[in-house]
Image: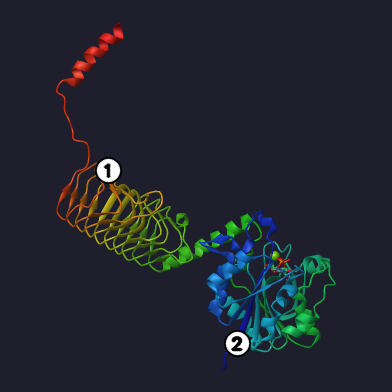
Amino acid sequence: MTVRSCLTVVLAAGEGTRMRSLRAKVLHAVAGRPLVAHVLAAVQATGGRVAVVVGPGADAVTAAVKAVAPDADVFVQAERRGTAHAVLAARAALEQGADDILVVFADTPLIRPETLAALRAPLAAGAAVSVLGFRPADPTGYGRLVTDGDDLFAIREEKDASAEERAIRLCNAGLMGLSGAHALALLDRIGDANAKREFYLTDAVALARESGFRAAVTEAIDDSEVLGVNTQAQLAEVGAVLQQRLRGALLDAGVTMAAPETVHLCFDTTIAHDVTIEPYVVFGPGVSVEEGAVIKAFSHLEGARVGRGALVGPYARLRPGAVLEADVHIGNFVEIKAATVETGAKANHLSYIGDARIGAKANVGAGTITCNYDGVLKHKTDIGAGAFIGSNSSLVAPVKIGDGAYVGSGSVITTDVPADGLAVARGRQTVKQGWAARWRAIASVKKKS
Ligand code: UD1
Ligand code: MG
């Protein structure tokens, strides 16, 4: 069997008025990345060339597209005159030719590569048009599929449908496959003689039939896949479906979560088997967790690596660049940023560790702060292996604490501490015998007078 070439045209020129947001609709994010990036990931898994159609002035959309699909060709649809008009904005890409042309919407982020492949199958079998059908609980607003058995005759947009056609439950999910051999000829014949005066992509079905070609319907296995985003409520709904998918995949892979519905994941969260995630943990982008680690409740992680057997939280915050090696303990109200915490080191309570290295088995006492910022520049703190930092110390960077050194509790450390040395940098304690009793006696006399 020869491999059929494919061009996918992603329509992203929508205005997204109903989002009531200054940001372009397809840049709103679910599970840590924009809608359009989710769609492009599914499209890339399908293979072939990619063309994205954006609205005028959509530089931010173009940038988001290029970030995930640098090879994609971006076209601008100057005026918004319907889905067929949008596809034709990518005429130059269509003219280069492909066996299969897929049209997908950038605001439908749950689409799976398997479904895109299923949509292409009828094209390989000779159909000129292939449509993804589904049966929504409420078909209002969707194009209805006019069929006889497996035979698809036309797609009727709701505004143009007769009462009889409106009663049809099988609807157009919006995704379409077109045979590359006929795509341009069909698209160029589409007119705008309809209720919305738009060039409807869906008219390709009836036109193909008129020319004696076949049109096919593939029913979506999972209706949630074709959920589109037009409002903030739908964005949240799609996000919730995605979270369920991501959690399900982790549970299948051997991750323990007592309350998975409270754990928020990102598209790229990587968690090994035998990791335990307690309730209410939030993962931002770029987190990986290795075997046997435990992430305790209410922790927030982003851009971080958690090594084997590490304990994190409850209430820990790992920010970008946090690298915890094996068996590290990071406890409650500890924030780690751009810092490597080496094997077996501990910072269990109320600390800020930023721009630092903490050597193996070092112990960072409660309330320790790396003072990494001088108002202009960031500086590094380097703590040696086995060092002991007494509670409530401030380490004013740049500064080095040698291997095995001690820092006395409450110190403000501004110069390097040699290996195995002790640094104490705080006011010396003075004790006045009997002072409190004398003071109370004086004070009680004053109070009476
Ligand atoms: C479309 C389908 C309808 C289907 C529904 C599924 C057509 C004519 N109708 O209707 O059968 O049931 O999707 O959700 O295709 N777009 C552009 N430029 C345009 C017009 C649209 O880029 O000029 C983009 C939109 O941003 C959106 C997509 O194409 O991502 C679909 O457009 P939309 O106006 O939402 O079409 P529907 O009326 O929902
Ligand atoms: Mg729509």
Position of 213 relative to 62 (above/below): below
In space, the residues marked 2 and 1 are separated at their CA atoms by 64 Å
Question: Most extreme residue toward the top, as rendered?
Answer: 449
Residue 112 in view (yes/no): no
Element at badge 2? Answer: loop
Element at badge 1? Answer: loop
Question: Most extreme residue toward the bottom, as rendered?
Answer: 1
Taking the image as four quarters, which one is ligand 2 found in? bottom right
Residue 245 in view (yes/no): yes
Question: Most extreme residue toward the front, as rendered?
Answer: 376
Which of pointers 2 and 1 indicates the residue nearer the eye? 1
- Identify residue type, mark 2: Ser
x and y, in percent, of residue 286 in the image: 43, 64
x and y, in percent, of residue 270 in the image: 41, 67
Q: Which quarter of the image is occupied by the N terminus?
A: bottom right
What label sits on residue 180 in the rendered view?
Answer: none
Q: Which quarter of the image is occupied by the C terminus?
A: top left
- Residue 148, quarter of picture: bottom right
Residue corresponding to mark 1: 392
Residue corresponding to mark 2: 5
